[in-house]
Image (tube, rainbow, N blue to C red):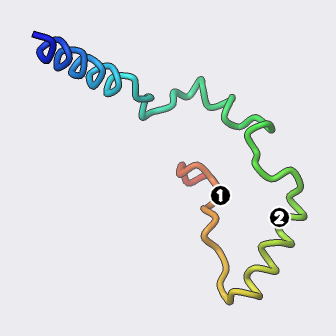
Amino acid sequence: MASQSFFRALVFLVVVAATACGRTAVRASEKEFLADQVMVFDSDPHETASDDHIMSNREGAAGGHGAGGGGCGCN
């Protein structure tokens, strides 16, 4: 009897965890919050460019930081 209630609780937790995942798409009205300055990880773009230059000279490779634009072809 106890194992049956444990199994039900486990199934319930798995279902709740599976449905608690985030959405896969961001609506256009929500994108303004993603472009906020708070969302930028590097505080100084000149320092980041300098670090990238040093790493490309040290490692012999450059890039891998993503691409500009949003995929709309307008850049």
Quadrant in which residue 44 is drawn: bottom right
Q: Is residue 68 above or below residue 32?
A: below
Query: Residue 68 at what x, y percent from top left?
Result: 65, 58
Query: Residue 56 at what x, y percent from top left?
Result: 73, 82
Q: Give the class, few, some or many, for how many residues have Cα within 10 Å of label 2's Cα (few <14, many ≥20).
A: few
Amino acid at dot 2: Thr
Q: Which residue is labeled 1 in the image?
A: 68
Query: Residue 31 at what x, y percent from top left?
Result: 62, 31
Looking at the image, which is closer to me, 56 or 26?
A: 56
Badge nearest the viewer, 1 or 2: 2
Quadrant in which residue 29 is drawn: top right
Q: Quick one: label 1 or label 2, which is nearer the N terminus?
A: 2
- Residue visible at 42% across and 34% down? 24
Disc assigned to residue 31: none
- Residue visible at 56% across and 28% down? 28
Quadrant for the C terminus in the image: bottom right
Looking at the image, which is closer to me, 2 or 36?
A: 2
Q: Is residue 9 above or below residue 56?
A: above
Mark 1 → mark 2, Cα distance in angstroms: 16 Å
Q: Which residue is labeled 2 in the image?
A: 48
Quadrant for the N terminus in the image: top left
Verify CB contact (< 8 Å) between mark 1 and mark 2. no
**In this image, 27 relative to 31: left or right?**
left
Quadrant in which residue 61 is drawn: bottom right
